[in-house]
Image (tube, grey):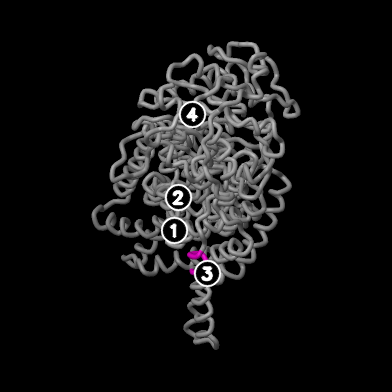
Amino acid sequence: MGQQPGLDGLRGLSVLAVIAYHAGFSAFHGGFLGVEVFFVVSGYLITTLLLEEHERSATVSLRSFWVRRARRLLPALAVVLVATTVWVLIWGSPEQASQMRRDLPWAVGYLANWGQILGDVPYFASADPPLLRHLWSLAVEEQWYVVWPLVFIWLLRRTRSDRRRARLVVVGAVVSYLVAWWAVRGGSAPMGWPVSGADRINFAYLSTPTRASGLLLGAAAAFVWRPWRRPGLERLPSRPLDLALGISLGVLVSVFIGADLTAGYMYPWVLALTAIASLVAIGVVVHPAASGARVVLGNRWIVAVGRRSYGLYLWHWPVFVVVGATEGGLGSFLVASAVTVVLSEVAYRTVEVPMRSGALGRWWTRRAPGRRAVVVAVVASVVSLSVAVAAVDEFDPSIGGKEQEFVLTPADEPSDDSALAESVVPTTLGGVVGTSTIAPSEEVPSASTSVAPIVASTTTLPLVTPEEPVRLVVLGDSQAGSLAVNLPSGIEEFFEVVDGSSDGCSIHESGIVRSSLPFALDMAMCEGVLDRWERRATAGGVALVVLGAWDVLDLEVDGVARPFASLEWNAIFVERLDSAVSRVVDAGATVALLEVACMRPVDVEGAGVPALPERGDDARVTHLNSVLAGYAEATDGVVFVEGPDAWCADEVIATDLDYRWDGVHVYRPGAKLIIETVAPALLALAAGE
């Protein structure tokens, strides 16, 4: 086949789409599909090389093949892994160091995709992205390079024609698409494969069986489409080929712009469409008569990007995370891109190109002076880094603060908010009667408007001491998780606490929550969270539902925006709340909805999520509490429990990062404040009073 600059140009376009996607630009919401183009190109090229080797020598040298792949891939990856590890150990946060300890062994073994699947690390989660998250695609390709030559040799021995081989490989691609479809649609999980809830999309996007389809289609095309072998084709008219290329590139650009990684239609439909469009583009590029393709994809600048695409892909993600260029900011993107280009170019000239040409082997065979010292230094460095990474402590940002002691006191004083509770006017919100100072049709006041949240009641609660600890299931998002893991010592005498939280997940299993900042969270990652709620509640007890952090944001459902506190938002929220609570009640637990606290979000290191202004808007919190209280009043087996007044009334406590490390999630002093406030109500609820 020879050198085909157009294929480099196609890879150049694809890596730019991936980089734009990772930068958080909404205009390239589907840029992750650039990886699928890489897969198709790789499948075509590798199979073509194997075919040409077999035609030349009537055999295929597995050793030579794997050595060539190792020269091509390993040195550049090793440099990135070493550089990233050193940076994390010296300047990285404790969380990044913990992530590196988890991810590095998988990356070294080219199993990063399975590490993310088995470790429950959603690729599409926006908070706290791991520095090595992007290596999943390299793992898929390397696994392909190990297995495919063996399959290729088997096909040559078992079948007699290239067309039959191509048909068999296409069948394999179809099976791969069916596995992806099965996973996303919720099929049963053989051999314990994690394909429930958010794991279904993670599995479909990351696993080798579901992503081998593009590689297989590229391989199938190589068996039947090698037009450079047919003389005279260069004299054919170029216009039909140019038209086909234009259509295929148009399809690719469209999916780069509009596709959604978590949407059900992605698997297998858009994935298959991307692979087919890539096949058409490849078929045109390698055709001798495709003069238009040589102009469009043979441009020297895009070809240069394509030839460096491997290094650009390796370097850009850790650089973007370090610089903070993953949220769509143009300035940070330009800085991160400049750093990426410099680092990848240096590595390309000093590592990638020399290693591909066998520089390491030549140096070794010449018995160069100092060879032994270099080897010892490299081994010592690798061992030292490995030991340093292994010594890193696991990090959980939700745990912190001084140890606290649980003190149970009766709630014998009426709330300071009783006047407000008596003065608010009942209003109907989405079919549920509640109390609110914000009418559904009104614009929600800004964060500068401070309104104290409503309370559950002002009656005095008797102190109920249980004969044995009450089973308390804490359900909700990361706020619930922070509460559950930071509870004071001594509480085990009164409560048997079960952590049923799911980070990033409220009661939504679909839709997108959006802030006025360039930040959004796709709740598709939470699909199946209510199943977990139900399972946690099956043993009975009291279920304390802790919501609020994601529920004060606007909601987008089926592509339609539902502004916070609008009638549509209220209706959707109440419907989903009822679905969640009903499952917990039916499972045998009594539900307590915790009053949403006034939040004082701040930007702190390791937060993963910026300080969203909606969380600091007390008027939004008031409205959300009114909906929760109204729902509890109208629903059997559900109560609304008043939280600490200090979150709204005492700015010293509310803004103290020892209580809430980011103004939203509690540390131990904050957890003590909450649990001691609500304990009398929860114990009375468990006793049936």
- Label 1 element class: helix
Q: Identify the magenta region.
A: 387-391
First of labels 3, 4 by sequence position? 3
Graded by Cα atoms within 10 Å as few (under 14), some (14 to 19) or many (20 or more), the crowding at tag 3 reads some
Distance CA(mark 4)–CA(mark 1): 52 Å
Q: Amino acid at mark 1?
A: Trp
Q: Quadrant of residue 425?
A: top right
- According to the picture, the residue beneath numbered tag 2 turns out to be 116
Mark whose residue sits in front, 4 or 1: 4
Is residue 321 or residue 594 the one in the foreground?
Answer: 594
- Which residue is at a point 44% across and 67% down the rendered structure image? 68
- According to the picture, the residue beneath numbered tag 1 turns out to be 106
- According to the picture, the residue beneath numbered tag 3 turns out to be 385
Please state if 193 lies on the left or on the right of 49 as rendered: left
Relative to 319, say whether 507 is above or below: above
First of labels 1, 3 by sequence position? 1
Relative to 629, say whether 28 is above or below: below
- The secondary structure that dominates the magenta segment is helix
Distance CA(mark 2)–CA(mark 1): 9 Å
- According to the picture, the residue beneath numbered tag 4 turns out to be 463
Distance CA(mark 4)–CA(mark 2): 47 Å
Q: Amino acid at mark 3?
A: Leu
Q: Is residue 509 magenta?
A: no
User: Is residue 481 visible from the viewing direction of this image?
Assistant: yes
Q: Is residue 389 magenta?
A: yes
Distance CA(mark 3)–CA(mark 4): 56 Å
Relative to 386, say whether 210 is above or below: above
Graded by Cα atoms within 10 Å as few (under 14), some (14 to 19) or many (20 or more), the crowding at tag 4 reads some
Q: Quadrant of the C terminus?
A: top left
